[in-house]
Amino acid sequence: MSFADLKKQSKLGSLTAKLVKEVEKMNNTNGNNDDRLWKLDVDKSGNGYAIIRFLPAPDGEDLPFVKLYSHAFQGPGGWYIENSLTTLGQKDPVSEFNTTLWNNGTDAGKDAARKQKRKLTYISNIYVVKDPANPENEGKTFLYKYGKKIFDKLTAAMQPEFEDEEAIDPFDFWQGANFKLKAKNVAGYRNYDSSEFAAVTPLLDDDDAMEALWKKQDSLQEFVAADQFKSYDELKKRLGYVLGNNAPARQDPEVSDEDSDRGVAEELVTAATTGKSAPTEDEDDALSYFAKLAQE
């Protein structure tokens, strides 16, 4: 294209339209390069709808989900974006530091701890029944990352609150149920409260087809394998750098006790998620964005 053509396009406004289209495409991208991951697309109003089916545990694994803790926050020295060793039941320097902040008796300490709180993510295999925004995904299996709100709905399905409600296994091929995933904007935040399970029904009428799906599922344990986590010392060094080398050494015994550490960390998560902080569902995008910033 010549410079004259460029000027002509400028007058016609065609470049602006093209750029807007590209930006929209970027905004609708998962934010990561793993094409195994599925994500619900939403419109400009923040509304989205799809029907998915949670799948059983992959062959050779015990559970149909894994739970991953991570941290993403900014300090004077840059961004800290790391998986938390608490996922593996081990001590983590950020959790220890947050314990110190939380226990220092000040509101500022608690606020700082909340900003550095653990993010809880669940990962499962799913089958996409209906995806109006991306119909090419329908009939395929993907990995799906989701937060506590959706996990609570899975738990509620397995342990109904009222006697007239029948318990279901949402991860079962035959006795499970499709999940109507509904997203909307509430006070500027992503909300999934309207999501619900449909009636119990087999995923497919063909056992052979379901067996083929089961064999195609991706490993979940790979996300919580030891090689996905840095060592305590590596994380502590990174934390010190991010905090401007002001991170404390190992805590005193009375506050570094494992049970105390876990209890306070859980309190941090609870306090943060019941406050005015953004819901965890949107934090996957933030993690990807923050990771790019940290690499620059």
Image: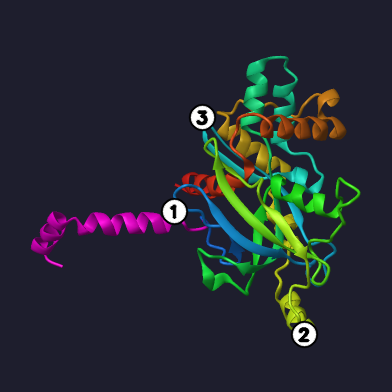
Which secondary structure dominates the residues rendered in magenta?
Answer: helix
Is 237 above or below relative to 182? above
Report, in whole angstroms, how far the alpha carbon at label 3 lies from the one at label 2: 56 Å
Labelled disc at residue 27? 1
User: What span is in magenta?
Assistant: 1-30
Q: Amino acid at mark 1?
A: Asn
Outermost residue to the top: 105
Q: Is residue 158 visible to us here?
A: yes
Q: Secondary structure at mark 3?
A: loop
| Residue at (79, 61) in percent of width and height | 170
Mark 3 / mark 2, whichever is N-terminal = 3
Is 33 above or below relative to 244? below
Residue 180 located within the stretch drawn in magenta: no
Outermost residue to the front: 164
Labelled disc at residue 208? 2
Between disc 1 and disc 2, the foreground one is: 2
Labelled disc at residue 76? 3
Report, in whole angstroms, how far the alpha carbon at label 1 lies from the one at label 2: 38 Å
Report, in whole angstroms, how far the alpha carbon at label 3 lies from the one at label 1: 28 Å
| Residue at (80, 43) in percent of width and height | 90
Question: Which quadrant of the rendered structure holds the N terminus?
Answer: bottom left
Viewer-proximal residue, 260 or 166? 166
Residue 10 located within the stretch drawn in magenta: yes
Residue 239 picture location, percent across and down: 62, 35
In the visual, does 201 lie left or right of 131? right
Residue 274 picture location, percent across and down: 69, 31
Q: Residues within 10 Å of mark 1 (few under 14, many from 20)?
A: few
Q: Secondary structure at mark 1?
A: helix
Q: Quadrant of residue 210?
A: bottom right
